[in-house]
Image (tube, grey):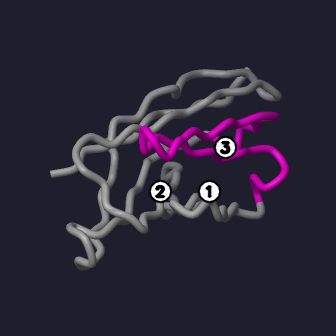
Amino acid sequence: QVQLVESGGGLVQPGGSLRLSCAPSGIIFTPYTMGWYRQAPGKERELVASIMSGGGTIYADSVKDRFSIAGDNDKKTIYLQMNSLKPEDTAVYYCRLDSPIRIFGPQRTYWGQGTQVTVSS
């Protein structure tokens, strides 16, 4: 059973920076996609950024010029560097992993427990 361990959330002032990390436990099979989603109160969960095991990335338009996602293939860990944070970035940020359950097996989705990011003065 794969578990995702997130860290790096917190309180930051507008214009500040935070770095989130997500490390999976267990065996991860390729190809996989890992990413960050966020959910603000009263809103649906939305994609922030994702990265594939081959290196391709996707960003939400709202964060494209401010956030950067990177991955460490050896550790299967991903990082989300968030710069120029805005109050509207306030949300619970969730790590997500989509990977096969075994070599050439069907895909399965795993979620982390979430980490709170609050942008406020």
Where is 4 relative to 35, above or below?
above
The secondary structure type at the circle numbered 3 is helix
What percent of the width, then of the height, locates residue 89?
A: 67, 43
What percent of the width, then of the height, locates residue 81?
A: 68, 36
Q: Is residue 89 left or right of residue 108?
A: right
Q: Nearer the viewer, mark 1 or mark 2?
A: 2
Verify CB contact (< 8 Å) between mark 2 and mark 3. no
Chain part drawn in magenta: 62-89
Report the Cα–Cα distance between label 1 and label 3.
13 Å
Image quadrant in which the C terminus is located: top right
Q: Nearer the viewer, mark 1 or mark 3?
A: 1
Report the Cα–Cα distance between label 1 and label 2.
9 Å
Q: Is residue 103 left or right of residue 57?
A: left
Q: How many marks?
A: 3
Image mark for residue 49: 1
108 in magenta: no
Q: Amino acid at mark 1?
A: Ala
Where is 77 relative to 110, above or below?
above
Q: Amino acid at mark 2?
A: Met
Q: Which residue is mark 3?
A: 89
- Mark 1 crowdedness (10 Å alpha carbons): few <14, some 14-19, many ≥20: many
Image mark for residue 34: 2
Whichever of callouts 1 and 3 sits on the residue coming sooner in the sequence is: 1
- Residue drawn at (57%, 39%) of the image: 79
65 in magenta: yes
